[in-house]
Amino acid sequence: MRKKRSGLRVALSNSVRTQDFHIPWGDAVVSTLITAGILLLLFKVFTSVSLSLPGILAAVFAFELILLSLYTTAIGKWVLPVGVVLTAGACILLKGDVIAGFGALANDAVHFLTEKTGLIILDFKVADNGKILWALCPLTALLALFISRSVWCGAFLPVLPLVLPLYLMVMIGFLPCGLECGILIIGLVLLLMQRTAGRQGAANSLRGLPSHLIPVILCLALCLVPAYLADGKLKTNAMESLEELLHERLYDSPSNSMPEGRLKNLRAWNKSDTPAIELTMEEPEKLYLRGAVYEVYTGKQWKAVPTDEKAEYQDLFYWLHKSGFYGQGQIGIASKYTTQAEPLKMRVRNLTACKEHGYYPYAVYGAKKPNESLIGDSRLPVEEELKYLKGSVPEWYEIQKNLSSAQGRENIAEYLTLEQAYGEYVTKVDLQIPLETWMVLDRQLGQSDEEKSILEIREIILAYLEKNMSYDEKIRTMSGNGDFLQYTLEKSGRGYSVHYATAAVMMLRYMGVPARYVEGYFLSAEDAKKYMSGETITLTEEYAHAWAEYYVNGVGFVPFEVTPGYIDDEEIEMGGSGASEDNTYAANPQKFAQVQRPERLEEREQEMEIFSFNPQYLLAIPVLLILLLILLICKRRLRLKRKLKTIDEADIRDSITMRFGYASCLLSHSTVRLPEETAKAEMLNREALFSNHEMTHAQKETVDEYAQNVLKTCKKNWNWREKIRYKLWECLY
């Protein structure tokens, strides 16, 4: 009977296959490709490492060749443990330099995570980029030792724990899919071929590939195509679609009526009376309940600022948040220096609205759970119990005017310093306009170098939209792959709050005013009068709304209503009695940055839908092949189940012969031998085949028991890889 062994132990126990020294060139190439591929992907995280591709390949190949050559000698079995001990000893002796180097690598990883998550993560003080090679050398040595041992032993599966996390990071967009992936996948394919070929000398690595591993190799090999064709974007369209699907499943309800920034082929507004928000206020009044805030307009949707761009402002927001400055509650913070108004209580209970974020009034006062680690202030943390200041835009402009007269109050200078820094961030982020959109606005509004007050800008936008847009909740905006705003302003001329808010935000930006697009819920002053203090107000999806907001120096973002039916006397009066607003902006030394204006370009006719093939879609090929492999396995398992059922339901004579045949098939895939039981079962099989007398149930049960013993013994004798192969691919049991 074959000795029971499994996993890497088989390879380790047989690692010294020859005492004759020779140079294993083939193994060195395979291990170099795998090691270098892993290192190159890691260097996408450790950006402080600046090594050339030829240099990395040459150094790794030389080291791997030395290790693999040692494996051919009598000391081969000691190479891995001795190498690990020597590496650990060197790290201990040079621990100061090694710790500083690993600190530098850790800081690179921190910066990488900041770019991917948009969170503030503090650096390690022990870091020293000048010592980074002191950490890179032992890391590379350990990786090369492990990979070379696995390649020499022909062990594929032990490498997967190192490779699969990297591949998953590529699939979800954390790492780019490029040449590094190609090098790594070629190495893995060669290792898999080597493992299945059987070791008959180091040069015999690429022969004898079993057919059952062909689908796996194809899955890996086809990954090479997107590796070379991908255009370097961090997220593919497929992943964005997956993110949207997960968002809908985790946070949304079927009744949600706002598009959540998605503008491409925008549907009609699907109003409903489904309760979305349950609200209580001490003094009910007109209320913009801000929910999702978007800053980046792409022409097809509104999005949050990409996390890698936010990472540039990590230090700024660390300073702001540590100083108690949060953009979500800026009006409330400013009011502390200008008014003595007491904050009122508000309770916001989410029923069916999007649960990814909270819903805040503009003058929120001292939110309990600000996210100190979040870069940027457009994401509102979930909070039910809030405090707010009574009032609206006129009162908030009054706060701005009074800030200048509050210069002598305690900490006012510190607040103004923080606000100015935040205002500079807003100016950089919330003035961006795509070129195509700028051209549309340039045609519609015309260029003017004359500076305008916010008062004049508001009047221009309201007048334009009143003249050129018609309110229509049933409109379907089939903008296709074109610019949503161009279709709305130059082709359709109709829309509802989403259209009006998008137009207002981009017009504000065009005229130099930082602005953002907001979706949430709106309670009008007329509706608010119907409720008493503390009475529960239920906001249905009919109260869902989109609007623009722009930045007021010293105070923060305030709403700007442009949608017909929502504009009340307050908005109109802002244009007639806003002299203080005009003077405030003229007196403030901070000027709004003007958008850089490109030269006029000839614009081609927009098409409704433009078909384009993105090479990144090829990343879906391995996933589809894996799904196909799973379906094939399920089909084979079902076929096995049917055959076993046929054996059970056959008459006694046929059942005996088929069951014996099944046991013989199992034995053909193992070195197991059961002489006594096999002889008895063979006699019953011959009797069932060639005799004419009737067979008994006891004889059938004897053969069934024999087949069960064979299966049990085979499973006990097979290693875990053989169990997977015979169960999931060849489907023998």
Image (tube, rainbow, N blue to C red):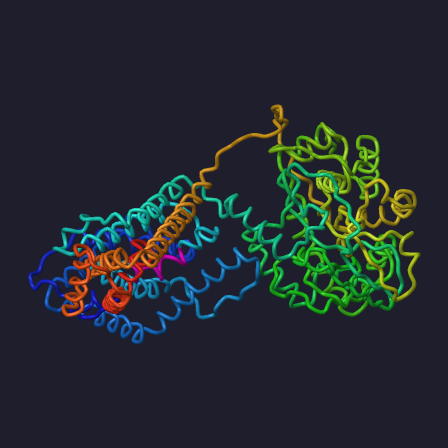
Nearest to the observer: residue 209 or residue 53: 209
Quadrant position of residue 276: bottom right
Q: Quadrant of the N terminus?
A: bottom left
> In the shown orientation, is residue 483 left or right of residue 702?
right
From the image, which quarter does the C terminus lie in? bottom left
Residue 605 point in image, percent of width and height? 62, 23
When the figure is inspected, residue 198 is found, relative to residue 697, above or below; the finding is above
Q: Position of residue 400 (x, y in %)?
A: 82, 56
Q: In front here: 503 or 727? A: 727
Horizontal and vertical percent for residue 68? Answer: 18, 60
Look at the picture and state if 315 lies above or below 190. Answer: below
Identify the residue at the far front of this view. 693
Q: Is residue 316 visible in the rendered structure shown here? A: yes
Q: Does the magenta segment cover residue 169? A: no
- Please state the extent of the stretch shown in magenta in the rendering: 157-166
Is residue 164 shown in magenta?
yes
Quadrant position of residue 450: top right
The count of marks equals: 0
Percent x, y of residue 215 = 32, 47
For the question of whether residue 63 can be seen, the reply is no
Left or right, 216 with reference to 200: right
Q: Return the residue nearer the eye: 155 or 370.
A: 155
The kind of secondary structure the magenta stretch mainly shows is helix
Of the pair 558 and 691, the residue shown nearer to us = 691
Q: Quadrant of residue 495?
A: top right
Residue 68 in the image: above or below residue 628 = below
